[in-house]
Image (tube, rainbow, N blue to C red):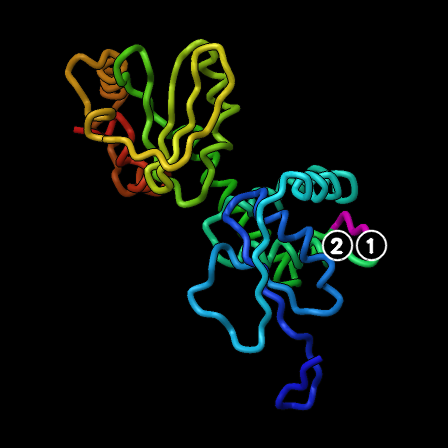
Amino acid sequence: MIVSETGQTCKPKKILICEDSMEGIFSAVYDGWKYGDYYEVSLSIGEPWEQEFFAGYKTIPADSVKFRKVIRSIWNKLGMTAWEQIGYCAVADDAEKGTAIFHTLWKALSHGQCNRDIMEELADPYVNHVFKMHTRVWHEYHRFLGFVRFREAGGGVLFSKIKPENDILEMLGPHFQNRYPLESWMIYDEKRSKVLIHPAGEDCSVRRDVHLKIEQVSKPTENDEYEQLWKAFCDSITIEARRNPKLQQQFLPRKFQTNMTEFIK
């Protein structure tokens, strides 16, 4: 124990460094469990810019076995609703997400507890942080279900470019796979340089560190039948007298309009 300036004792810090992925974060949660009683545990997503004095650091590699064990514990002990809320947080664009997830699970499951109502305890700062991250990711995910626009990229492949704040690319896969099962398509996350690929009639897969020449793939052309039909439809239902750009922006922020066919001149 460390004695503070006020004379109070506090736990030494243990900072676990993990990769920014579900597997990486929950592997660190698994390893962090053995330190929870003796240390103030934090999770650092990637190498920290600056290291704290009097803190111990340990790098935790992603481990699929540890990941699955943690996930099963959440499913079995806290239920699928809690898993959805906590799982959404793992893809949030938030440097403190790992620490918030760890302490929420520690509060719910440590020392033999099984608090299935943990996500209702919003007075707890970590639970509250998880709740807010889940809400933010959920809203962005559902917006992109409606705002993704495809255009033909050649060879019969449909292409879409997105730039979400949170890492939701894989989450979009099941929806569009069910919607376009017989089409070959891909969705490119420009912010993270990765692409979700769906060959016709097959399952989706993700490729990382992909640097596409967007100008060649996504540039509109006069011969793009899908794009021209969609623009014609949007023009046909538009009532000029009722056009309200400010109201439109409330429901459809400008950051989404950048890659939407009907807004590309």
Mark 1 burial class by Cα count in 10 Å: few <14, some 14-19, many 20+: few
Q: Are marks 1 and 2 in contact (CB under 8 Å)?
A: yes
Q: Quadrant of the N terminus?
A: bottom right
Q: Is residue 40 magenta?
A: no
**Residue at 60 percent of width and 63 percent of height:** 42
Q: Mark 2 points at which residue?
A: 108
**Residue at 24 percent of width and 33 percent of height:** 243
Q: Which of 206 and 169 is in front in this view?
A: 206
In the image, residue 52 sits, relative to residue 123, either above or below, namely below
Q: Which residue lies furthest to the right in this view?
A: 112
In the image, residue 141 sits, relative to residue 122, either above or below, namely above
Bounds of the magenta segment: 112-117
Residue 184 image position (x, y, % from top left): 39, 14
Check residue 178 in the rendering and tell me which mark sits there, or answer none. none
Q: Which amino acid does label 1 sit on?
A: Gln
Q: Which of marks 1 and 2 is nearer the N terminus?
A: 2
Q: Is residue 167 rendered to the left or right of residue 122?
A: left
